[in-house]
Image (cartoon, helix red, strand yellow):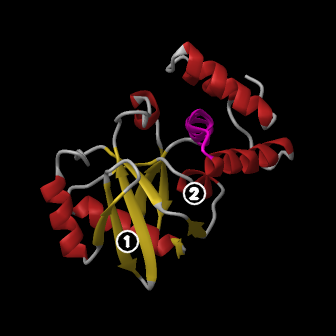
Amino acid sequence: MGYDRSALATIIKSLRDRGIDGVIVGSTCYMLYLGLKEFEDDIDLFTTTVSPTFDEDLIRSCSEELGCFLGQTEWGTPQLRCSVGGYEVVVELYENMYDFYIPQEMIDDAVSYKVNDVDVKALRVEDYLIIKSKSGREKDVADIQYLGDLIKSGDIRVDKGLMRRRLGLFEDFEVRLIRRRLEGIGIRL
């Protein structure tokens, strides 16, 4: 499943126009950072204007207006499967709940990218690395390994000072786990 920049801009604008806005927190973060023209995976949107848990009626209405199929993520939050410009685009809506946690400082410090005249907010690549290191799912480990290889080769740079400061947003046991996983890909903090 893939989609282009135009499809990303269209779905973000369409959701925003209907009151659903947020910050991209999944792999699309680093794809935007790398300046890619084509994206893979779904769009993980940490909502800042609605609650995926408590604003079900608004989300259902939006889904119907856009002609999207409404399903659920693995966390039980809404997942919209939409046809956009000939692509199937999946948008998963998230908020802090259970073990899914992104510190507000990271959300507030998101980067804004101009995608076909639409401002698209996404986590900083440094924050993405920390969040995915904390998660540790197989796919997340593969993503951080890919980014680690780009960092080692000098193709991208990260602000290790920012990353060290961000570690202060987590519990000590989480910090140890995050550091260990980051060291596994060659990032020593």
Q: Which residues are magenta?
A: 125-137
On the picture, is 183 further left or further right than 87?
Answer: right
Q: Amino acid at mark 1?
A: Thr
Q: Position of residue 143 (x, y in %)?
A: 67, 50
Q: Amino acid at mark 2?
A: Leu
On the picture, is 118 further left or further right than 49?
Answer: right
- Which residue corresponds to the image point at 19% horizontal and 73% vertical from the top-left? 64
Distance from label 1 to label 2 (Cα)?
15 Å
Nearer-N-terminus badge (1/2):
1
Quarter-wise, where is residue 68 in the image? bottom left
Q: Secondary structure at mark 2?
A: helix
In the picture of the structure, the residue carrying the numbered disc 2 is 32
- Which residue corresponds to the image point at 65% horizontal and 48% vertical from the top-left? 138
Q: Position of residue 84 (x, y in %)?
A: 39, 79
Residue ranking furthest to the right:
153
In the picture of the structure, the residue carrying the numbered disc 1 is 10
Label 2 packing within 10 angstroms: few (<14), some (14-19), many (20+) = many
On the picture, is 29 further left or further right than 95?
Answer: right
Label 1 packing within 10 angstroms: few (<14), some (14-19), many (20+) = some
- Return the mark for residue 140: none
